[in-house]
Image (cartoon, coloured by chain):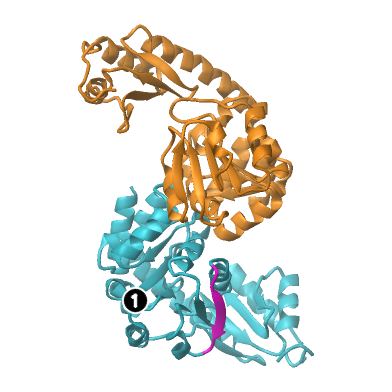
Chain colours: A cyan, B orange
Amino acid sequence: MLDRLAATAAETYRAPSRDCVVPAPGTQILLAPVAALVPPGTAAVLGPTYGEFARAAALAGHHVIKVEDIEQLRGADLGVVANPNNPDGRFLKTHELLDLAHARGDRGLLVIDEAFMDVRPADASLSGEVARHNIVVLRSFGKFFGLAGLRLGFALARPQIAQRLAAALGPWAVSGPAALIGQTALADVAWANATRQRLEREARRLDAVLAGRAGYIVGGTSLFRLLRTPAAGHLFHHLGRAGIFSRSFPEHAAWLRFGLPADEASWERLGAALADFSDWTHREPFAP
Amino acid sequence: MLDRLAATAAETYRAPSRDCVVPAPGTQILLAPVAALVPPGTAAVLGPTYGEFARAAALAGHHVIKVEDIEQLRGADLGVVANPNNPDGRFLKTHELLDLAHARGDRGLLVIDEAFMDVRPADASLSGEVARHNIVVLRSFGKFFGLAGLRLGFALARPQIAQRLAAALGPWAVSGPAALIGQTALADVAWANATRQRLEREARRLDAVLAGRAGYIVGGTSLFRLLRTPAAGHLFHHLGRAGIFSRSFPEHAAWLRFGLPADEASWERLGAALADFSDWTHREPFAP
């Protein structure tokens, strides 16, 4: 069952072969063994991003630095970039990452977390290039397919690296339900294409709902949008009282991330709560 | 959901508290992080046993030795024992293991894999003692509950150790289905008691089916029995042709492990295949 899953994942993600695919119970649990592929050294994480990789790298004994420029990933033993990035949607083109991988050569490892790549065209991914460089691409199943609780993800890497990761996880890492559901869903190319288009339409609708307030859309993917507004803190609490959860960021007080509302009633609820908010110009003392 | 699962597991396994419980997607995936709790040194595995722990300990950089006597676990940085043992059912009493843990003191870690402990009375487990020693107890969910494919298991240890293991797994290690099903099943004490009794009856029935052949039962738990016979190799193939899978052991050519047949038809098929076997006295060249 895992073999079929890995073969389907290789095809869907356009990885060079099934031997480049390591199925895992979520990409989260891969972070520690991926960070441990490289002896303790310097881990550079391109920020601002999801915090779990810095934590896993520190656990593996690395000195972790957060950097702002892709060039700063060049000299690190472990270079980490999320593409497209969460929460701001920053997107690096394939050739930029390949230039970086080429410049790094045999040194350490470059990790590309493509957790939100499914919303992009296939040629935006580095999955097809894993056999030619010291890179690990992480692909998440749960986000795009809406089944995060199933726990399924993949590491894609050249076979020598893939074997080491697979050995760290052991032979029965993925649950039977996750293997069967994942294999079926990954093979459904028509659903994926239709969903990509639907998500793009809905993301534009979210832009329209958020537009014209005292803030602006910093970026995002078609699964979420990041709003920057001095009223972020007040708006977070206002929405929360209306039963709407947005994502706030302790280190970025002016940021608020919005997921796509699930159904028409939720769209209306969000629209009403935003229309009802009067504090847009209230500048909080802690907003940068 | 994970909090409720951990609390229920603590109660069912009689662990000192919820803070001693680390839920994981199977105990298999815990082996590498457990082995990495101790800096590379000597790992002593009480054999003969399940091979995955020696593999995980070697991956973590330990020099692995297989020992035959519990006393030899005393000086190792990492001591590993399966209790009850697979495949021979060797069972160490609580006081033997506590004496060992006491003698080892603060040195390294003693790991007790209780994957098959559910078939035993609760006081046979070391789960209740984890807060007082440098020990990690592994509990498997899938074997006793017949849901191995769900991937659920637990490490039990003092809170400081449990926190390190939980950090290595990250925050979303267990799938939603596994958490909900596991929590429900672990809380069903009546089912567990009835199942323990049913398994004991069925194990005695398996003993009777296997008895009187040119072999003897080495041991087992009430989930499996280990037969020793010079005809093991021939019998393995004979049963395989009848569609019955027994477990052979490359390093122990005279061993054959039998699980419990699933239903009445399977019992009859096993009985018929054994009655049909005429090679009991055939001594194979490779049998010790």
Q: Residue at position x 70%, y 45% from top?
A: B7
Residue A67 located within the stretch drawn in magenta: yes
Chain letter, disc 1 residue: A
The image quadrant of residue B193 is top right
Q: Is residue B274 above or below residue A125?
A: above
Which one is nearer the viewer's eye here, B261 or A256? B261
Q: Amino acid at mark 1?
A: Leu
**How far across and down, in percent of the image, does residue B162 sit?**
65, 52
Which is the main secondary structure of the residues drawn in magenta? strand
Which one is nearer the viewer's eye here, A64 or A124? A64
Q: Secondary structure at mark 1?
A: loop
**Residue B1 can be seen in this image:** no
The image quadrant of residue B167 is bottom right
**Residue A118 can be seen in this image:** yes
Q: Which residues are magenta?
A: A61-68
Say which residue label 1 marks: A126
Which one is nearer the viewer's eye here, B45 or A164? B45
Q: Residue at position x 56%, y 33% from top?
A: B71
**How far across and down, in percent of the image, does residue B48 sit?**
43, 32
**How far across and down, in percent of the image, does residue B34 sit?**
55, 51
Residue B113 located within the stretch drawn in magenta: no
Q: Residues within 10 Å of mark 1 (few under 14, many from 20)?
A: many
